[in-house]
Image: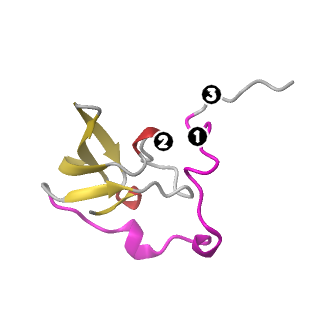
Amino acid sequence: MAKMSHGPRAKTRSKIRKRLSERGPIPVNRLVKAFQVGDRVAIDIEPSYHNGMPFKRFQGYTGIVEGVRGDAYIIKINDGGKEKIVISHPVHLKRA
């Protein structure tokens, strides 16, 4: 019997998957979009782009842009009554 995977995408078969109509290359405007500090954004993981991918638990969470770190954005979210920081590439974010 094979060992269970404990990697960063374990148990994400349905959570991080594109629908049939969404498959193919990522549109350029999704790669280069910009946000300002204070914008509300939703975390929507793009499964075909692995750089700057947030942890699978935060899929669907909404937060506020706190700053920029290189090409990525620092997002402050509320997770179970605690404030947490998620660092994500803009391809995994959309305006909320």
Residues packed near mark 3 inside 10 Å, few (<14), some (14 to 19) or many (20 plus): few
Residue at 43% x, 74% y: name it.
28
Residue pushed farthest right? Answer: 1
Does the magenta segment cover residue 75? no
Residue on which disc 1 sits: 9
Q: Where is residue 67 in the image (x, y as percent from the top left)?
A: 18, 48
Whether pointer 1 and pointer 2 mark residues with C-beta atoms closer than 8 Å, the reply is yes
Q: Which amino acid does label 2 sit on?
A: Lys
Q: Which of marks 1 and 2 is nearer the N terminus?
A: 1
Q: Which amino acid does label 1 sit on?
A: Arg
Q: In which quarter of the image is the C terminus?
A: bottom left
Left or right of residue 42: residue 20: right
Q: Is residue 50 above or below residue 84?
A: below
Left or right of residue 76: residue 12: right
Tell me the distance, in whole angstroms, between the alpha carbons under discs 3 and 2.
13 Å
Q: Earlier in the sequence, mark 3 or mark 2?
A: 3
Q: In this view, does 72 lie above or below 94?
A: above
Residue on which disc 2 sits: 56
Residue at 25% x, 65% y: name it.
34
Tell me the distance, in whole angstroms, between the alpha carbons under discs 1 and 3.
8 Å
Judged from the image, the secondary structure of the residue bearing numbered disc 1 is loop
Judged from the image, the secondary structure of the residue bearing numbered disc 3 is loop
Q: Position of residue 33 (x, y in %)?
A: 31, 68
Q: What residue type is labelled 3?
A: His
Q: Position of residue 48 (x, y in %)?
A: 57, 58
- Magenta span: 8-36
Residue 92 seen in this snapshot: yes
Whether pointer 3 and pointer 2 mark residues with C-beta atoms closer than 8 Å, the reply is no
